[in-house]
Amino acid sequence: MGNVHQNKGEYDLALMNYEKALKIQLKALPPDHPDIASTYNNMGALHQNKGEYDLALMNYEKALKIQLKALPPDHPLLALTYNNM
């Protein structure tokens, strides 16, 4: 739902859904699970689209930290996060 709201430009609703998803993921998954990194990447994209570059970078860095622990060093998702940053 967050992605759909973001694509519609409804950033507050998108962020609300991303935060709900993140809260569930942080309770249900190990702290270095790639799905958590994906949510941080989505939140980073949202802030980037809003021109909130410091917040975007903060979220991308959180995603990268998780991905560096959870994924092989040549995984394409690492490249995506570096590209986003």
Image (spheres, helix red, strand yellow):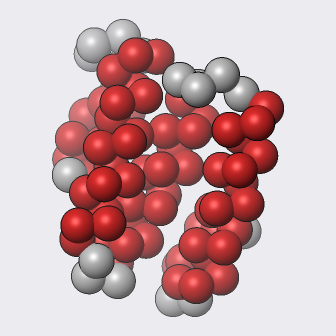
In this view, the residue in front, 45 or 31, is 31
Counting from the top left corner in percent of width and height, residue 1 is at 72, 68
Residue 30 appears in the picture as rendered:
yes
Res 5 visible = no
* Number of marks: 0
Does residue 54 appear to the left or right of 8 in the view shown? left
Q: Is residue 57 left or right of residue 10?
A: left
Between 71 and 58, the one lying in front of the other is: 58
With respect to residue 12, does 23 lie above or below? Answer: above
The quarter of the displayed image where residue 8 is located: bottom right
Q: Residue at x 37, y 53 (%)?
A: 59
- For residue 1, side relative to residue 51 (left or right): right
Is residue 76 depicted above or below 40 in this figure?
above
Q: Residue at x 43, y 28 (%)?
A: 66
Residue 34 placement: quadrant:
top right
Residue 30, percent from left and from top: 66, 22
Q: Residue at x 47, y 61 (%)?
A: 43
Residue at image point 48% right, 58% down: 42
Furthest-bottom residue in this view: 9
Q: Is residue 50 left or right of residue 79?
A: right
Residue placed most toward the observer, 54 or 83? 54
Q: Position of residue 52 (x, y in %)?
A: 28, 77
Q: Is residue 57 above or below residue 73?
A: below
Q: Position of residue 51 (x, y in %)?
A: 26, 82
